[in-house]
Amino acid sequence: MNKKDVEELIFKLNEAEHAYYVKNSPIMSDGEYDKIFNQLKEIESKNPELVFSYSPTQRVTGTPDNAFQTVEHKQRMYSLDNSENIDDVQKWIEKIEKITDLDIFPITVEPKIDGLAISLFYKNGVLTQGLTRGDGLVGEDVTHNIKTIKNIPLKLKNQINNEIEVRGEIYMPKKSFKELNSQKLIDKELLEKLLKKDKNLLSSDEKSLIKKLRSEGTTEFINARNAAAGSLRQKDSQITATRDLRLLAYQLIEHDGSTVESYSEQISLIEGYGFNTSNLKIANNIKEINTVLDEIDEKRNSYEYQIDGAVLKVNSNLVQDKIGFTSKAPRWALAYKFPAEEQTTTLLDIKLQVGRTGAVTPVAVLDPINVGGAQVSFATLHNPDEIQRKDLRINDVVIVRRAGDVIPEVVSSIKERRDGRQQEWKMQKACPCGEYEIEFINDEKVPRCSGNYACVIAKKEMLIYFASKAGLDIEGLGKETVETLIENNLVNSYEDFYSLNYEELISLPQWKEKKTKNLLDAIEESITAEPIKILSALGIRYVGKQTAKLLINNFGSINSIFESSIQEVEKIHGISGSVANSLIDWYAIESNKSLLSKFNKIGFRINEVVKSSSGKLNGKTFVLTGTLSSLTRQEATNLIEKSGGIVTTSVSKNTDYILYGESPGSKLEKGKKLGVELLSEKDFQLLTSK
């Protein structure tokens, strides 16, 4: 085995990594990659002289002596001047136009990633060093951790004979951040459990696990940027290697003299070297800039990474040179900031709200604040344990996050800003309905109203859910309309919707003839709903769309489900004892039995027998985790359901398959422990094409 043979193996592995992590288009199966990787590793172990720094086997190494040492940047890493609206952009353009007679357009516009600026150095095409931005003049050496990031080439695809510097932003995908924090929570509970044990009774494995958990840390990260920063600053590169970090490159500096004429050419050259770059847009006037900024803002939550704005740059290198720099920033570039998705405000109070199944959850009452372009006065707190875990107190200054249409949440309190006015919150005993007490059932973290379906607040929420898109999707029967009908004593149960008449509705304030007729028509049309939709709309605890589908496919009709025994329900693969008990409890209430009888008389398909699916995946339960490269999650879900399978969100002993993609989370580990069959995308394609 000689250098040429080793170079060939390295080339194959590097090409596979580039195709998978940069192009998102795999050219090699996991098994084939592992086989070549292990072959290379064996050769290197026997031939130390054939171990090259750009070999994929060298991504994870020990911590070198120079790790985190401060190093002076060869060229300063400037920050950018900020703008917050299109008027600021117009002023920036007018200002730089006064500096030069040259045309400053075109101007490039690209998303601004909320990550960590990094500088990478390559000599003769091989990665030699990675530095953080630091203060712009001096950064920290993080080469040992940079090498673990799979979409950073250890050797450039195009051969070069000089030293170049590539700058970019290190980030953690939003999905990976959520999965990391979920794992942190699991680790924290595990560590607390282990630390409660008698030290003398701990096994050697448990002691090692405690040491490992303490080393990696169990504190959740506030946001994806903090997670990326914390991961990049790990002393142990093996920990960094387990974190899903990525690089998006945005600048090329050739220390032996520039050979490109524009920023867009620079980006093309960077791509040719094997890097991921952002989706660059070219604008030829202020109107086009505004259009692109609006497009990026609209897509903001669809990006896999967190963005906090956009970056505008004069495209021409010649014009950039003419415009130059201020003492802090380049004049030819501008950061356009979107409304922040995280803000600080005061936690004024904690109130309780009741859901349709009687679940009682705490809600944060906030001093109103604009977050992510919307006014936020309330935020979810999930459950009482969450309040205790985050140590939230009334009058705390807190960090609130809101991304897109996601419900705002309180991320953490800023304990350093406590001033003695803070009060600990205690869970009240009475349900907000005023008729029943709040109770904790078994080991559930979310308490419930002991009145169950009799709770007036839960009943209102059930009526709203029944008519909503998740229920029967009755057009015109939204939350406000349902509340109006309840307040006017026209609706108190599901069947009441079907006894509404024109005279009652038209007499309501501001109800017009067209609105009334359309609503009555929509209610009438809902009677023809599919049995699966009817069952899930009833609001029975644990019975959502997927569970309803399993039940209908096995028993044939809604009526047959409730005529079956608890043992018959539990026999269904994918149905837990909790579901069976919930069905029994619901049907034990006389008013619910009466409801099904009335629905049958109205014309609902209560007794209709649905033919069970005969697809190749009939009755099989799937859980999806990680980022899929060959198809979207929705496409995978559609394919599974079309073949008779069921997609659920949590892993249990009843899960048949886990379909995993890039950067799978804790679901994969749980599946392994439970012995669930794991499917790569290639395995899944083979399974569905049989």
Image (tube, helix red, strand yellow):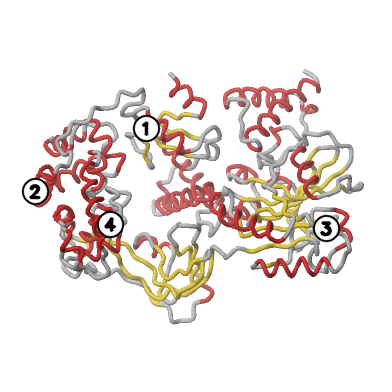
Of residues 301 and 288, the one drawn nearer to the viewer in this rendering: 288
Which residue extends farthest right?
256
- List x then y, in percent, for residue 82: 70, 67
Residue on which disc 3 sits: 72
Give whichever of 279, 422 is nearer the camera.
Answer: 279
Image coordinates of residue 278 in percent, x first then y, are 68, 47
Relative to 603, is 92 on the left or the right? right
Which residue does the numbered mark 4 point to in the structure image? 477
Residue drawn at point x = 18 percent, y = 55 percent = 497
Which of the two discs, 3 and 1, sits closer to the camera?
Answer: 1
Amino acid type indicated by mark 1? Glu
Q: Is residue 438 above or below residue 157?
A: below
Instruction: Of the two numbered discs 1 and 2 on the same chain, state the one appearing first in sequence.
Output: 2
Label placed on residue 641: 1
Disc 3 to disc 1, how far (Cα)?
Answer: 57 Å
Query: Dot 3 lies on which element?
Result: strand
User: Dot 1: what SS?
Assistant: helix
Q: Amino acid at mark 2?
A: Ser
